[in-house]
Amino acid sequence: MAKGEEEEQKEVSQGLFFDLSQFDLEVHVREALGTALLLSEGNPLNAGHLLNSAIIASYKTSSSAFSKWASFFPGLGRNYFSTGKPISRSEINSLPVNSFLAASFETAKAFFRENVEIWGRDYITLALLAIGDVSLNEIAFAANLSLQSLRDEWFRFVSSDKTSGNHRPWAQWWRAQGLQVPDESGDVSPPADLEEERQSATYLLTWNPKRHPAGYLSKKVAQFEEQGELIMRWSVGDHGIKRGDRVFFMRHGDSQPGLIGAGDIASDIVKGPHWDETKPANWVSYYAEVRWEVLQELPLIPLPELVQQTGEEKLWTETGSGLPIPQKLAQKLEILWKESSLSNAQKNLSSSTSVNQAAAAVAVGGSITPQRPEFSHTVELPEVAPPQSQQPAATSSEQEQPKPTGAPEPAITAPRPPDAWMLSDRPLEDRFAEQDRFQFRDYASALATILDHEKTETPFTMAINAPWGAGKTTLANMIAEQLQQRPKDRGHAPHIICWFNAWMHDDAPNLATAFVSEVGRTADLHRTGFRRIVNPLPSALLEPSSRNWRRIILGTLILLPTILVWLWVGSHLQRVEQYKKYEASKSEPYQITTTVTKDALGKTTSSEAKTQNKFDPKLPVPTEPFVPNKVDRFLENFQSRMILLGAFFTALAGLLGLLAKVFTSTPLGGFVQSPDKAAEAGAIQSAEKQLKKLISQATWRGNRFVVFVDDIERCKLLRSIDVLDAVNQLMDHKGVVVVLLGDMSAVAAAAQLKYKDLAEIFVPSAGIALTASDRGKEAFGRLYLQKIVQFQFDLPIPPTTKIREYLKQLAATPQPEGGRNG
Amino acid sequence: MAEPKQNAAPDPRNPYWQLFSLIISIVVLSAVWFYLIGLLDYIELLRDSSIVKVLQYGIAGLFLALGTYGAFLQFFELRAAAQARQANQKVAEAFNQIKNRTPDKNVAEISTREVAASLKDAKIGDEQLGRLVEQRKQQLLIDDEYFREELSSLIVDYLQPLPRNTKRLLNRFRVNLLIAHSRGLLISEPKVTAQQIGKWLVLMERWPQLGRSLSAAPEKMKVLEEQAVHPAPTKSSPPQPDPFMESITALAPPYLGDEDLRKFIHSQPGVAVVVPRLVHYGAAELA
């Protein structure tokens, strides 16, 4: 915009106010106005502020007009903005606005007189018909429509929506603003789907991921995506459903409930055995073939939104399949479904309004993405038609005008930026049934069965081998979950799981000691309280914070009795002293003190002072004759030897401290503190025995101790072999299972390098017919690994088709998935 | 210290006796605390002080309350475990009944509904029952001696039967059998049998390069099986073409001339029909 025009607009804008005090504002409108003031940041309100505030308010309110308005902007993220406070009554008579909005308001007032309550649709129309307001260009751009099309669409909505009772003469309002009424020649025809009287009924089918086989729906969705349509047999209940009826598909469960599909019944209803195998054999279900026109794994309309938009909750949370949806609700649902489908289809597009830019920034985790400049100033638009002569004077400066009927609408060609949210590569940690895209659950189940099986001999070391990023940690998480769940189902104690990330401890002076410490700490947590007190974990194995806590507790345990003894002794001595004074006061009421002084000339003078020999009245007066016992005599002797008394208590505290230290120092602690010295002193065997004792005490209920060692190949060169050596030397106990996760070829290469001198002259026999290709450079390393790793599971890389499906799902997933760590 | 019994011994504690003994211990310990804190009264400064009373009742009361709470938590945990053990026992019995009734039935084909029908009075939740049945099936699958015998003969014939390698191959076999079971390969057409899994494993172990080539092009297995039917041509002049060895040359040249391979491919059961399924469920991990 030229500078002159800006100044002109500024001048026109100054001093203009809305006075809405003569009207009743619907609560949604008051809320939206509050938000608009927030958006305007103190500047006069323009149409864009009002219309953006209506979008934002639609997320929080149940206004159908606002919801409809928001549906024009499918690319906008939701819930990213807080709405402003509803505007107060004192504010509504002085709302600062720009001239275009003021002019629009003047026109609108004529239509408001008939019905003084201003609704959401009035609010939007008022802003949308603010002729000449350049902020409307941004709005139209965000909606991916021309401004005229947007107004036309809005006109069709307000004039056809019967829920409002059609309370305004919309066509007149349009004409009053000098705008062409869509379909001027005749009645505006509302969209067919609104007018059409449904002949068929609508029903709700349900699916609960918890009660169906894992991955079942994933397969069906994949099939649907591949073929473009899908006919699927489903339980439809016995509520009068018939061929041709419309159905929606509801996903239940704790995680991401909502509508995931829509279609119609393509067959007659048939009776069959109940789909749930756990039900008695004589139970039946009613089935029909359902032709899905939309089917996806994650909700198109999440449950909270569905409840908010439809005002219905009970029906959506009923678990029975095939419940009828009342007609009015069904109509509302159809509209909502269409809007959401459109929104989903355009998900990859986003608008350029500041609202959307901020939404994108929030969606990528709060970081500010490179923002496009404000549309109204810099985005290149096609030339728009010059102002028409028949426009009202108030709109002489506006940049766009409605075109004559039939004139082509200038198309906005500025490209939309893609959605800017990011995906984390964190492994899955929970909700495996829903998020397991590559059916890792099958591998996890097989491996957990083996590790949990009572006949599996321990100690047992296995490896899960795969390149980086293939999903080893996810698989390990699944195995760990099953290793805890499976024994529980049988009424046994769950296996103990210990995690050690070799890479995270790569900076530790010795990886083996870090490993032993982690194992020791985990084992300690599962020992009984009695064991932990009687046989505490060596201090060297504790984390610094735990070590400090232990010091505090031990210090308290030493100091507290010392202080108590001191208090007891002190009070005893005080009692004796008190008695003595009391006795003295009875025999000699006064004590005479003689003071002799000598002056400078050598003359001496003496004076006598007489003081009353009395006891402390605050202390209790002895009532019985005092007969000192042995303790009194003993303490009396010490009274004059306070230094000795202090030394006694110091020695007592020191002795207790020394005992505590001796108590918590063990060969295992020695190994952790200095493994080399321990090795020289032959203490490794003792350390190993002690670790064995710890693990035995932890697995006292017959469960197993399963250690997952992750990222073993990511350590510095050769350090992975330290861990393997530690596993080999120190974890050789019954009940111990070690699962190594990593790219084992890298570990084999490290072993090859560590023992390169030996590897050059010696190729150990594998016991199987080695071929020339198998006798590669890493033969020694691989065979070394075989010595330690008894079973290696090579995690298959998912086939390309699966990866393709996964990408599709990722594109449609509203939130990145994942769990704990990388 | 005695070694714990691995995974076979459930927690032997009786929940009711455990609750009783814990409550008694907690009451006694609370009384001890009460008495010990009362000794503070011997300190002149604290004699007849309300602080001692507050400490006595506060600490001993807190100990009593927390201890009782913990005892009941443990009681509920132990009781749930006892019920789960009972459920597991009943499921095992139901399985035995079904096996006795239909000895030829594949374990993988026993459904939860069948087991549920045998458990008339058992109060087991649907989810727990499903998991227990699945666990039982998996255990029975890998316990089956028949599979082991089949595999043993293959190992003896085609691999160097060192104890360690035999054990490793058995481990792999069990894991792959379980994966095949989880993915329904044992009951859906074309059914994969344990013998076929075993044969595929041996092939991957003894002729890994050929295994990798076949994983990339599973349809080649059918060709190989057809060609292996014909014996190796006798030495003659001019030399007779040997289509089997020509295929081997293309797929895995190092095994050219390995007559064991021809014999192995020719042996029953054939795996050509199921190789695509074996590869799909992860046969590559056997390499």
Image (spheres, coloured by chain):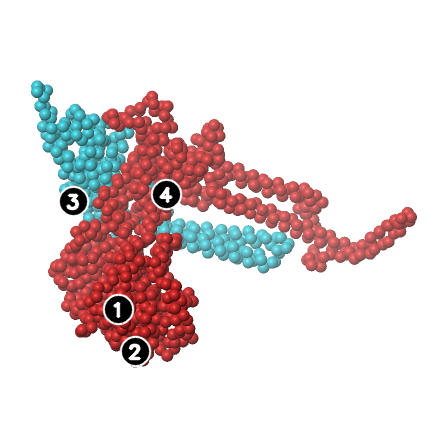
Chain colours: A red, B cyan
**Front residue of A140 and B279:** A140
**Front residue of A532 and A138:** A138
Q: Are marks 4 and 1 in contact (CB under 8 Å)?
A: no
**Front residue of A254 and B81:** A254
Q: How many other residues sit within 10 Å of disc 4, few (<14), some (14-19) or many (≥20)?
A: some
Q: The numbered mark 4 sits on a residue in which chain?
A: A
Taking the spot 69% from the left edge, 49% from the top edge, the residue there is: A628
Quarter residue A590 falls in: bottom right
Disc nearer the start of the sequence (1/2): 2
SS at badge 2: helix
User: Which of label 1 and label 2 is nearer to you?
Assistant: 1
Q: CA distance from mark 4 to mark 2?
A: 72 Å
List x then y, in percent, for residue A646.
Answer: 65, 43
User: Which of label 3 and label 1 is nearer to you?
Assistant: 1
Identified by mark 4, the residue type is Ile
Residue indicated by mark 4? A497
Q: The numbered mark 3 sits on a residue in which chain?
A: B
Q: CA distance from mark 4 to mark 1?
A: 70 Å
Can the viewer see residue A693 in this picture?
Answer: no
Identified by mark 1, the residue type is Pro
Q: Which mark is residue B188?
A: 3
Q: How many other residues sit within 10 Å of disc 2, few (<14), some (14-19) or many (≥20)?
A: some
Q: Which mark is residue A325?
A: none
Q: The numbered mark 1 sits on a residue in which chain?
A: A
Q: Which mark is residue A111?
A: 2
